Amino acid sequence: MSVKRFGVLKCKVVAYKEERDDQDPHFQIEVLDDHDTHYRISVNVRSSSTQSEVLYLVDENFNASAITTLPEMNLGYTPITENNRDIALDYIRSQLFESSAMQPLPHDITGPDNDLNDLIHKYIQKAIDDEAILYVYGSRWGPEGKRDKIFGFKVGNGMHNVHMNQGNDGRWKGDNGSYQDGGLLIQFEDHWVGIFLAFLSQSWCTDDHGHPTAFCDHTQPRQI
């Protein structure tokens, strides 16, 4: 199995909301496509597992050369299948970064610029200020026949699973898959920023179906 309706949403950021006190907090982002369709992007900032901190990595000079077709796409949602896997993200197989570079970060710490909400806020606000293009990798939900519960637009519509989607065991093992990792890419005028998220409970040793294995067959990733 794998996450449902995996794909990439190309969009412009409209607004955002930080959740800090909720039992399952997310960084919520409202975005818009070329057809005036609104989406809510739910980004996990806290894990529901006993290891609650989320791993993150920000690449402020992300090399988008391997997915150069993204700028040619229209704004909107594009499903990703085996036929267009060249634009997919896979934290392990695409060798996007060294897994050891990811660091855990709490979602809510008193003070400025010191938690995961603050970090995402920084780049999403800059995307608004610079009118940058946001690419959201994850799984789509909706449309629903009701207003969005966070931003109030109608109809409810959005993306979630904006994080690594492999190496899960137990409750979340049904979400495992290859070339279906989530994340945020921001295309500014002169550079790209990549924001990548994963959970401490996930394994970096996975088979071709994204399931945990005892040993790594890959050259780049390692167990954190």
Image (cartoon, rainbow, N blue to C red):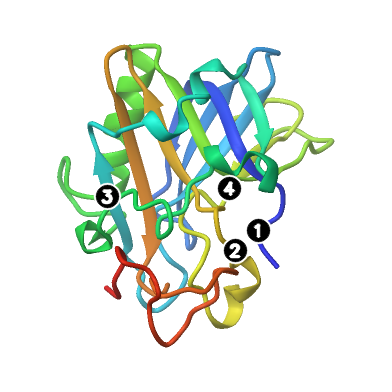
Are the residues tagged 4 and 3 within 8 Å (C-beta)?
A: no
Report the disc number at residue 161.
none
Badge nearest the viewer, 1 or 2? 2
Amino acid carrying label 2: it is Gly
Question: Position of 195 compared to 47: left or right?
Answer: left
Query: How far is mark 4 from mark 2, CA to CA?
Result: 15 Å
Query: How far is mark 1 from mark 4, CA to CA?
Result: 10 Å
Query: How far is mark 1 from mark 2, CA to CA?
Result: 7 Å
Q: Which residue corresponds to mark 4?
A: 160
Which of disc 2 and disc 4 is earlier in sequence?
4
Badge nearest the viewer, 2 or 3? 2
Report the disc number at residue 57.
3
Q: In which quarter of the image is the C terminus?
A: bottom left
Report the disc number at residue 3.
1
Q: Which residue corresponds to mark 2?
A: 177
Query: How far is mark 2 from mark 3, CA to CA?
Result: 21 Å
Element type at mark 4: strand
Element type at mark 2: loop
Q: In which quarter of the image is the N terminus?
A: bottom right
Amino acid carrying label 4: it is His
